[in-house]
Image (spheres, helix red, strand yellow):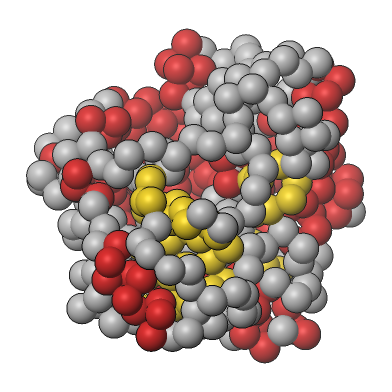
Amino acid sequence: MVPAGAVDESRPVRDEDAVDVAAVVWWLRGQGGQGGQGGPGVPAGEPEVRQFPGGASNLTYLLTWPDRELILRRPPAGAKARGAHDMTREYLIQRALGPVYPYVAGMVGLCRDESVIGSDFYLMERVDGTILRRDLTFELTASSASLLCERAWQALVRLHEVDVSGVPELAALGRGAGYVARQVAGWTERLGRAVTDDLGDWSDLTSWFDAHQPADLGQCLIHNDWRFDNLVLDPADLHVVGVLDWEMATVGDPLMDLGGALAYWVQADDDAFFRDFRRQPTTAPGMWTRLEVVRWYCERRGFEMTPERWRFYEAFGLFRLAVIIQQIWYRFCHGQTHNPAYAGFGAAVGYLEQRTRRVLSEGGAAA
């Protein structure tokens, strides 16, 4: 049975995110509707266009004809971090991953011609199902919530176990040893390019990460944005049927992926600000704690973990999330986006800074 209120969260397109749907359809018909893994041709007429919530990074739209639905992804307007919002990369990763990982949507077409709608974009088939947001809109028992956690993290384990060496397009994403070091340097540089008057001095934090970075644990395909709102669930029993938003996927250290994911994982006994900040229903009865996630994941992967070892990954995950939000806050402060949802992002950055400092002083979630 489909949970009430969990099927279609699309809404009218925000004015600042308007897209020229006639141009999209014109381009797609010129491709024969066969730009990726195939699929039926483009139906007659223009589709209804709606937008999915979120959109802090790339924007997502639903194009609906009477007998077909497609998803369109494109970057936001305004200045963009170098290397981010790369539609070609996101499209090609999913196209290559589809044959070896069962939770990827079918790719339909990639447009690199910015003259069509003002940016690159791609189209993919819609994966039907339930996406969890901040609060549950249906009743979920504690035992079902625990099972849901296991399924969600098992899907990440399955991703990390993909043999990228057997898929040349995925293997090409790897840059060899030094992934952790590149992440520390890269996110420190991104912070430096997104400074606002209220940011303060983070040099002691970035110096700590530089001095305490561990060697790479291994090289695997990592998602880099693993959250419930990027998972599509079967509405009948809530098993994972799709994984969305591959913008930041790459080949790298699996524990960096886990640490980044747990920066979003707010649990029931966290403070009021963090509980209000959450984007997932991870405070519901039966949801795992961060400690339980770390222990379960490391047991499945055969990794030994101690509180001192985990401290780096947990703290860096929070730091990385702070920089992501700071980049959006920078755009908001400079009038490059007017989405009112971003008005509180400055306070969120300050909170994450202090939370990062507490983790470094008190130890990580594996304690």
Q: Where is residue 293 in the image (x, y as percent from the top left)?
A: 76, 36
Residue 245 vertical placement versus 279 (above, below): below
Q: Which residue is drawn at 51% across and 54% down?
A: 66
Q: Position of residue 209 (x, y in %)?
A: 48, 51
Taking depth in this image into account, of 178 and 41 the one nearest to the observer is 41
Above or below, 146 relative to 89: above
Residue 111 horizontal side relative to residue 65, left or right: left
- Residue 176 x %, y %: 61, 80
Q: Nearer the viewer, residue 317 or 364?
A: 317
Screen quadrant of the C terminus: top right
Note whether residue 29 is visible.
Answer: yes
Q: Is residue 83 left or right of residue 277?
A: left
Q: Nearer the viewer, residue 293 or 332?
A: 332
Q: Position of residue 16 (x, y in %)?
A: 19, 47
User: Which residue appears at 32% of the width and 39% of the height?
Assistant: 12
Front-most of residues 347 and 202: 347
Q: Report the side of 323 relative to 200 (left or right).
A: right
Q: Quadrant of the N terminus?
A: top right
Residue extending furthest bottom?
Answer: 168
Residue 273's quadrant in the figure? top left
Res 102 quadrant in image = bottom right
